[in-house]
Structure formats: structure tokens, C-alpha cells
Image: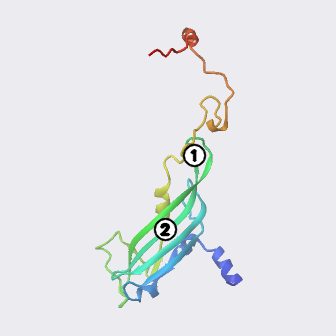
Amino acid sequence: MNTKSLKAKKSQSAAEALTFNVAGLLGEPIGSIRDLEVSSPPLDLGPDLHQNRGVAGRLRLTRTNRGLLVKGRLSTSIAQVCSRCLRDIDYPVELDIEEEVLPTLDLATGAPVDTEAEPDALRLTDHHELELEEEVRDGILLAEPIAPLCRQDCPGLCLECGLELGSGPHDHPDADIDPRLEALLGFAPTHEV
């Protein structure tokens, strides 16, 4: 790979990296397959959510009698804060994609296709391009956890001193006890059978 193509790839936007020209595949017989490597810089997810790394993975495009079947798995990670200990974490996100994509133009005539019968169907552009930026963005947003954890057994923070409970013993006085109940501290529990 020459230097110019490397520079062009590095400066490529997420929208460009998640757009694939499929005109050649649309002209092939039903059942034809194309495998694609996906490598995209981080997407703009708004002010409250950030990707720690770009999107990477593989897609398989299969020519159908109506358009394309897109299947694949993509991965990335998003910046989160542990809901128990408030530590910054790198939360992995796996996206499984399985979509039927339909053309907007008739391949034989070039005339626009009636899209009213299936208004929610994912469509190719007028230039026979598959654009996945919106689907990937939506998948990442839906994968954002409600209460992320740095690990499943995270003990959280001490209610007295605010230090992480898993960091060892905490040297702080016992909680204040109502003076009327102090006499109960002298009683040891008995275990009679």
C-alpha cells in the first residue's frame, strides 16, 4: 500500500468508512457473496457518549432477489463510569447486524422504486451505496448500559469514608450509636440449642 492511500485512509470520516459501493454485487446473480472488512474511526455520538476506539469487524453481503442481505458482527467500546465505584471504564460493545437492504433505483431501468410499500426498510443510496453509519450509531446507543460495572463483583464505595470497599480495611470510627442502646453492645449473642 503506498503512502497516499495510507494517508487517505487515516483521514477518512466514519461516514465514509461505513459506506460501501455495492453496484457490482447488485449486477451479479442471486446468491453471490461479498465479505467486507470494516474499520471506522469513532462516530460522533453526541455530547454525553464517547467511543474509546473505532468500529471494526466483518460484514457478509449476499445478493437476494430483492436486494442485499447484510450480516455481520462489529465491535467497539464506549467510555463509561462504574455505577458502584465511580471508576472510569472501557465498556465493550458488540453489534450483530442482520438487515435486508433494498435498492432505491430499479437496476434494469434506473427508474425510482416505489418505497411506500416498505417505508421502514433500509435502502441503498441512488448511487447503489450501502450506508451503515446510522445503523451502527443506533446500535451503540442501544447497547449503552443503564448501570455499567467495572467488574461483576465490584463492592462499591464505603458509605463512611468514600474509599473503594475492595481496597482494604478502612480506618474510621464506628457509626454513632444512640446512647440509650449503648448498653446492648456489652451483650454477647448466645447460641443455645
Q: Nearer the viewer, residue 143 or 10?
A: 143
Q: Quadrant of residue 17?
A: bottom right
Residue type, numbered disc 2? Arg
Q: Give the Cα separation between the discs numbered 2 and 1.
A: 26 Å
Confirm or deny contact between disc 2 and disc 1 (CB under 8 A).
Answer: no
Q: What residue lies at 50% left-to-right and 69% top-to-bottom?
A: 133
Q: Which residue is mark 1?
A: 82
Considering the image in quadrants, where does the N terminus appear?
bottom right
Q: How many marks?
A: 2
Mark 2, mark 1: which one is toward the viewer? 2
Residue 127 appears left or right of 52: left
Residue 53 sits in quarter: bottom right
Q: Which residue is mark 2?
A: 73
N-terminal-most mark, 2 or 1 = 2
Instruction: Answer whether residue 40 is visible to the viewer in this image.
Output: yes
Q: Position of residue 137 (x, y in %)?
A: 50, 63
| Label 2 environment density (alpha carbons within 10 Å; few <14, some 14–19, many ≥20) | some
Q: Label 1 sits on what residue type?
A: Cys
**Residue 114: x, y in percent?**
31, 79
